[in-house]
Image (tube, rainbow, N blue to C red):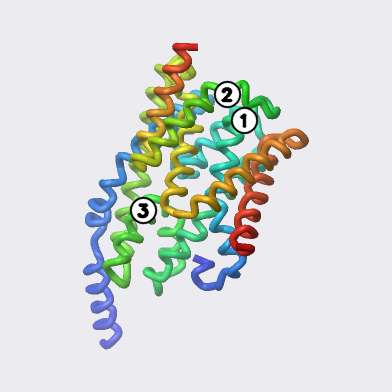
Amino acid sequence: MIFSKLRIPDLMIRWLDHVPVAVMGALLAQELLITDGRVNPGAHTLELIAAVPAFLTAFLTKSLFATVIVGILTVVGLRMLF
Amino acid sequence: MSTKTEHQLAQGVEDSLGTYFQGFKDCIPTLLGYLSIGFAAGVVERTAGFSLLEIGLISLLLYAGSGQFIAAGMLAAASPILSIIVTIFFVNARHLLLSAAIAPYFKGLSLGKSFFIGSLLTDETFGVAAAKATEQKRLGYKWMVGLNITAYLFWCAANVVGGLVGDWIAEPEKLGLDFALPGMFIGLLALQWISRKKYKLDFMVVVAAAVTLMAVSTILPGSAAVIIAIIAAATAGMVIERWK
């Protein structure tokens, strides 16, 4: 609303353009690499493995729903095995 | 007299741009997405200790998929309110760009009407509006309101249903529901990746975010580390793009 009347500085647009990817990267890293405020990927080994089929599903189907489902099912399967 | 005819003319143009009902119909293809993510959000919120009323309120007042996942996760981790607000502000900063991108199609609307459209805009309703905007020079206010309100109410309903079902799930970890949040981030990241087609650059931004997060996490609390990682990674992306 306000920005439609103002001109956003070019540099700001370029910066904002990278924010969504940066946000998702940071949040995902926090979920999968950090435990109780410490860097500890070992505590999330199964989740890190499950991230691979989830990513593949996202790229193949472009569906948020399918991605979440495949990720969840992989985690459940891995937890039953290990 | 002339103002009246002008007004009638404007009304006719507005009606030709679509009714509330047409907006509702154009929203339907996106509803499955709201259902699945809203349902998952409701389950996560319930397991984070929200009451059904709180779930209904957060989906109406915050109305942000990733924002609500983050709020639930950070509240469960007892993060300070200010860091939750700042994190969600950054997560949803893209709305500045979305609103700015469709604003030209609503030129001349009153401030109140613009505010009403902008505040209920989502990624999905933006997507539907942007697709429509390739066919016509202007978008109708009523059409956009129909589109936005349909998504808004459906989202709230899906959240509450998720909350109801969440009650029945005693151990969400057994069902892998704790992976709904990282799974959603994976999906959102991959979708960005595919549509932006800046594969190498975006990959470097993700790596920058992860590395900064790990480094900062050793000295600052998680929520502050996330914000610093976002700022550092977006800046890195901008610098790399300029430098090339």
Foreground of the two, A69 or B72: A69
Q: Is residue A47 left or right of residue B235?
A: left
* Residue B236 horizontal/vertical position (percent): 65, 54
* Residue B130 horizontal/vertical position (percent): 35, 61
Label 3 lies in what chain?
Answer: B
Q: Nearer the viewer, mark 3 or mark 1?
A: 1
- Element type where label 3 sits in the image: helix
Q: Pointers 2 and 1 in contact (CB under 8 A)?
A: yes
Give the position of the N terminus of chain B as an image quadrant: bottom left
- Residue tagged by mark 2? A44
Q: Amino acid at mark 3?
A: Thr
Q: How many marks do you count on the picture?
A: 3
Label 1 lies in what chain?
Answer: A
Q: Around disc 2, counting alpha carbons within 10 Å, would you say few (fewer than 14), some (14 to 19), or many (20 or more)? A: some
Q: Which mark is residue A33?
A: 1
- Residue tagged by mark 3? B125
